[in-house]
Amino acid sequence: MRNIAKMLGIFSLTLFLNGCQSSGKTSIVPAIVPNDQKATIVKTTDLDIIGAVEPIYFLPMKSAFEARIDTGATTSSIDADEIVEFERDGEKWVSFKVTNRRSGETHTFERPIIENLIIKRIDHKEHRIKVSLNVRFGGKKFSSEFTLAKRDNFEYQALIGRNLLTGRAIVDTSLSHTLK
């Protein structure tokens, strides 16, 4: 009697496990949402939601730069003047000056060159130097890569691209100045 009960238990378990096996095909059934419900945005991450224009600080400078947020740009850029390449200890470096147009604050930076780039514009190609800068963005301090650009003809002296945004922020272009 015990053996029969044991065999029935094993048989039942085998049937149950075989029934749980997948055929390898997965079907996804979408949820049905009534038309009268309004869409709501639910924040499911710890990322900040930022707007189209936000302040950024280039340390050790004390005044914020208004920065255009551009999710289409791969790399962030900053308006730089007096760009001079030089060599230090066998490595390529660059010296450049950054002036905040709003506050008048000026600082001269010297940084190792990460890369020399060719940026394709609509009507021409531009040579740019990529460096790493210490920044404060949204209350957090970190280092990020920027290309040095002549942004005299642009409203914003800094452009924040995907390299700085990825993993740090979600962009809602209907907002602006959400960070301090």
Image (tube, grey):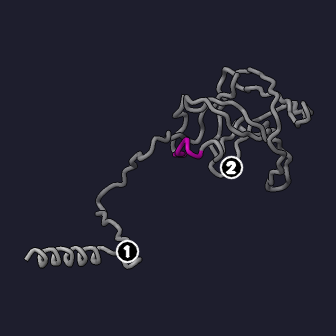
Question: Is residue 169 in the magenta section?
Answer: yes
Give the magenta part as a residue range: 166-173
Residue type highlighted by circle 1 = Ser
Residue at image coords 78%, 28% = 98
Which quarter of the image is occupied by the C terminus?
top right
Foreground pick, 151 / 72? 72
Residue bearing mark 2? 73
Direction from residue 159 to residue 32 in the image, left or right: left
Residue at image coords 66%, 30% = 135
Residue at image coords 34%, 71% = 29
- Asked where in the image residue 56 lies, by quadrant, the reply is top right
Question: Is residue 133 in the magenta section?
Answer: no
What crowding class fits label 1: few (fewer than 14 Cα within 10 Å), some (14-19), or many (20 or more)? few
Foreground pick, 3 / 54? 3
Q: Element at badge 1?
A: loop
Marks 2/1: CA–CA distance: 37 Å
Location of residue 120 in the rendering, given as x and y in whole percent from the top left corner: 80, 54
Foreground pick, 93 / 104? 93
What crowding class fits label 2: few (fewer than 14 Cα within 10 Å), some (14-19), or many (20 or more)? few
Foreground pick, 23 / 54? 23
